[in-house]
Amino acid sequence: MSFLKISNLSKKYANQPESAVTNVSFECNEGEFIAIVGENGSGKSTLLKLINGLIEPDQGSVFLENKKVKGPSENLVPGHPDINLLFQEFNLFPKHTVKENITYQLRYFSKDAQDERLNELIKVCKLEGLENKLPSELSGGQHQRVALARAMSDRPKLLLMDEPFSNLDVMLKDQIKIQVLDHLRKEGQTLIFITHDLGDALSLADRIMIMRAGQIVQLDVPEKIYEKPVDEYSAYLFGKVNIFDAENFFQSTGITGCKPTKSKISIRPEHFSITKDDKGDFKATVERIYYRGDSYEVVATVKNEITIRINTRKKNIFPGNEIMVKLIKSKIHFVD
Ligand code: ADP
Ligand code: MG
């Protein structure tokens, strides 16, 4: 039995030419963190609303612990009682204080239980001193932290968060992010969150879902997403990458023994290294060097035929230098 099972979900808004979500299927395990990434308009927010039963799918179904999540047509109260969604636009109750917003979902719990959870979340979301303020008195970052605390408050079976850290002040962002996600991990929370921060997706999620034009492009563990992207788009999404025409690459470098399965290959700059001696795989000529703080990015050409980007910590490399380049062969990855 899968904890959350999404099958063939599709949704087209009445006034739109294209569907927002097209034939999306995936499963999520209990306690798993899935990060959703993708360009604006790729259907991320719509997918979360469909999972929560807030909007009616044209097709497909959502099952949580083998029970169907009903859409608005079958459900008087919109949304599923065991699923919380933290909206991109927060939606706090404007006439209620921070404390009331956070404890709203706990209103049927005992006073002690409410206070205990409130105090815990005030700490985790760094809201000390704001308990009695109204949303209108809060900054954007504070707003978002209250919305986070409210979404977490009653420990839903499934927590959905739409860009939950996007409005946080830079100074607090890293701390709150880690604090909140560590806390959710400890509680065994199942979490699907949308993020624009690809570093967060790589470091904080168990699996990453890449969406484009309403569809899942790739859903896999971070290492696979980074090292084995399904296509050029996914490769570029997660940082610097070399994309070569496979035939050109093998011809110029003289590297053999790889059977091309697709026409292009992607190689991350850190999978090339510069060696002094003849232990390298091929020669290259340095064109430019960019200092990146913790490393250098070296742009070099091979026989004036291809240009490669290498990430290195080696100092004293200058334009015009001839270098030997070594490549970890297992990192050669074929893409469409
Ligand atoms: P994302 O969250 O990835 O930016 P959305 O799910 O918000 O994407 O939007 C997907 C597509 O659906 C976009 O083309 C958007 O304009 C459209 N859309 C989103 N919400 C509505 C709505 N309430 N009514 C009509 N079109 C919408
Ligand atoms: Mg969105």
Image: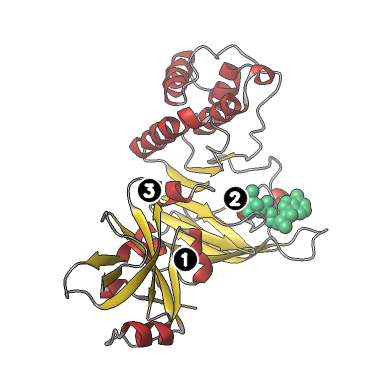
SS for tag 2? Answer: helix
Q: Amino acid at mark 1?
A: Ala
Q: Which residue is identified by label 2? A: 48
- Tell me which residue sits at (46%, 34%) in the image: 155
Q: Name the quadrant containing residue 19.
A: bottom right
In the rendering, at what x and y percent does residue 165 appear?
Answer: 52, 37
Q: CA distance from mark 2 to mark 3?
A: 21 Å
CA distance separating discs 3 and 1: 17 Å
Q: Determine the secondary structure under disc 1.
A: helix
Q: Amino acid at mark 2?
A: Leu
Kindly identify which residue carries mark 1: 235
- Specify whether residue 48 is in view: yes
Question: Which numbered disc, 2 or 1, marks the residue closer to the eye?
Answer: 1
Which of the labelled discs sits on residue 197, or is there none? none
Q: Circle 2: is it few (<14), some (14-19), or many (20+) Cα within 10 Å?
A: many
Q: Is residue 291 above or below residue 93?
A: below
**Residue 321 in the image, given as x and y percentages of width and height:** 31, 67
Above or below residue 161? Residue 20 is: below
